[in-house]
Image: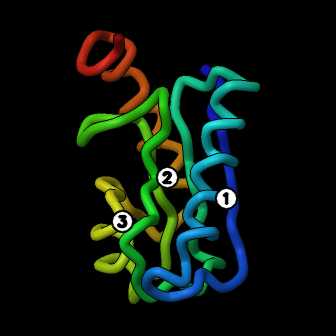
Amino acid sequence: MKFGLVRFRGTYRPGSEGLEDAVLIGRVLNMVCAMTDPAGMVIDLSGLDYQYGNDLHVGTYMFRGAGSPIVVIAKPEQVDAFRTAGANCIVADRSAAMALAAQRAGEWLSGNGAS
């Protein structure tokens, strides 16, 4: 199984000021899916200074919903903020993220969400 691993760093502007940031993140995630056709994705947001924003969503055109094989890496103090951005599965460690993404991808591919 191959996985997309995408890392974002920098500052996500708060609130509606972050719309362009959200659009860019969404396009990058969809581009990775289109180019690599991954079984799952690990999105590392631990280097992103994120407070809040209504437009950030980590789902992609391939993977949506609570059972999707998308795992987000975030700093512990950012977990609640990223949950409001649609991140259902958040961990603080890259190794744990990869293992969890593999598990969720297996479930996704076996029929718990695959189209």
Give the mark nearest the N terminus, 3 or 2: 3
Q: Amino acid at mark 2?
A: Ala
33 with respect to 93 (left or right):
right
Quarter of the view holding residue 33: top right
Tag 1 secondary structure: helix
Q: Amino acid at mark 3?
A: Ala
Foreground pick, 34 / 109: 34
Across and down, in percent, residue 30 comes to 62, 38
Of the 4 image quadrants, the one containing the N terminus is top right
Foreground pick, 114 / 21: 21
31 with respect to 80 (left or right):
right
The residue at which mark 1 appears reads as 24
Task: Tell me which residue sits at (41%, 78%) in the image.
Answer: 53
Q: How many residues crowd around disc 3 within 10 Å: few (fewer than 14), some, or many (20 or more)? A: some
Residue 110 seen from this side: yes
The residue at which mark 2 appears reads as 97
> How far apart are labels 1 and 3 at the CA level?
15 Å
Q: How many residues crowd around disc 1 within 10 Å: few (fewer than 14), some, or many (20 or more)? A: few
Residue 34, above or below 73: above
> How far apart are labels 1 and 2 at the CA level?
23 Å
Task: Tell me which residue sits at (36%, 33%) in the image.
Answer: 104
Across and down, in percent, residue 31 comes to 70, 36
Across and down, in percent, residue 101 comes to 46, 39
Task: Tell me which residue sits at (60%, 62%) in the image.
Answer: 44
Q: Amino acid at mark 1?
A: Leu
Colouring used for the render? rainbow
Tag 2 secondary structure: helix
The residue at which mark 3 appears reads as 85
